Amino acid sequence: MIPFDRRDLLRMAAVGAAGSLTAACSDRTAVPAAEAPATGAVRASAVASAPAATSAPTHPPLPALPFEVRTGPRTGDGVALTFHGQGDPAIARALLAEAGRAGAKVTVMAVGSWLDEQPAMARLVLDGGHELGNHTQNHLPISTMSADRAYTEIAACAARLKQLTGSIGSWFRPSQAQDCTATVAAQARRAGYAHCLSYDLDSLDYTDPGATAVASTVLDAVRPGSVVSLHFGHTGTIAALPVILDGLHRRGLRAVTTTELLT
């Protein structure tokens, strides 16, 4: 376990007492049945405007990177904090505000259906100097889908991102999976993505273990170049984030966007 000073503990206690927000997102748990569409269904508007299949990515590959990226350079001082973008928007705003106070930049892998419900979040992320990516339209288990169904999930989210921001985003991350299968990778390329963004450090914040445990999990294992998986939608992450950012700073590390980490 990492040591916490009095300031860390006071901050976590204060934020925890202030928050009674509802946790609403997990990379290991499908969306509730009431929110999930029927099999093969996505919003008609998203499907209608989904990017057509392409022979080349709309975002060219970054030099010297494989298609699937887990980490950045171990010789620099950057760390990418990547957030699953779904859940209570108040939690998302609190996390983005905390990142802004610390001068940190993050990457938000947005779920398309969340952007349908909370379209203003796209600009809030980008206007803060952060980065948006694609985490599928409905956050269903994409590794089990047919190629066409997987493509529809990826392309519908890409269409929503492009509608809201003018770009499909540079990064795709599979839903309910850490890595892209061969089928999913092919469909991500078809939708215009040059890279699948995995991660090497899972904060486990989606299990709601408490802020101290989340911060310890990250700071015990973080290294230069780490890509960390975190989530909107979990109140413990709000209290953990300032401790994580303080811990990174003390080690001479910076929270940067994924693109900055890898370029």
Image (tube, rainbow, N blue to C red):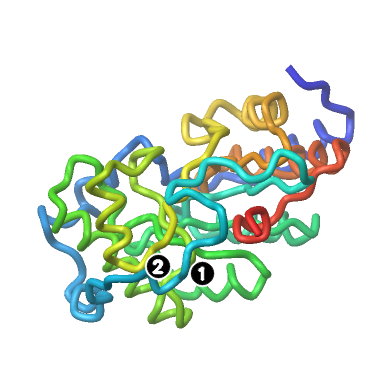
Q: Is residue 60 left or right of residue 262?
A: left
Give the x, y percent position of residue 23.
47, 43
Residue closer to the observer: 180 or 26: 180
Image vertical order of residue 58 relative to residue 181, above or below: below
Q: Quadrant of residue 134?
A: bottom left
Crowding at dot 1, Cα within 10 Å, few <14 / some 14-19 / many 20+, comes out as: some
Residue closer to the observer: 222 or 123: 222
User: Which quadrant of the rendered structure holds the N terminus?
Assistant: top right
Residue closer to the observer: 206 or 78: 78
Give the x, y percent position of residue 175.
34, 47
User: Which quadrant of the rendered structure holds the C terminus?
Assistant: bottom right
Whether residue 17 is visible to the viewer of this picture, yes or no, is no
Give the x, y percent position of residue 261.
67, 53
| Secondary element at tag 2 | helix
Q: Which residue is mark 2?
A: 115
How many marks on residues? 2
**What residue is rendered at 38% in x and 69% in y?**
57
| Secondary element at tag 1 | helix
Q: Are marks 1 and 2 in contact (CB under 8 Å)?
A: yes
Q: Quadrant of residue 28?
A: top left
Q: Residue furthest top?
A: 1
Task: Tell me which amino acid carries mark 2.
Answer: Leu
Image vertical order of residue 98 relative to residue 193, above or below: above
Give the x, y percent position of residue 221.
67, 26
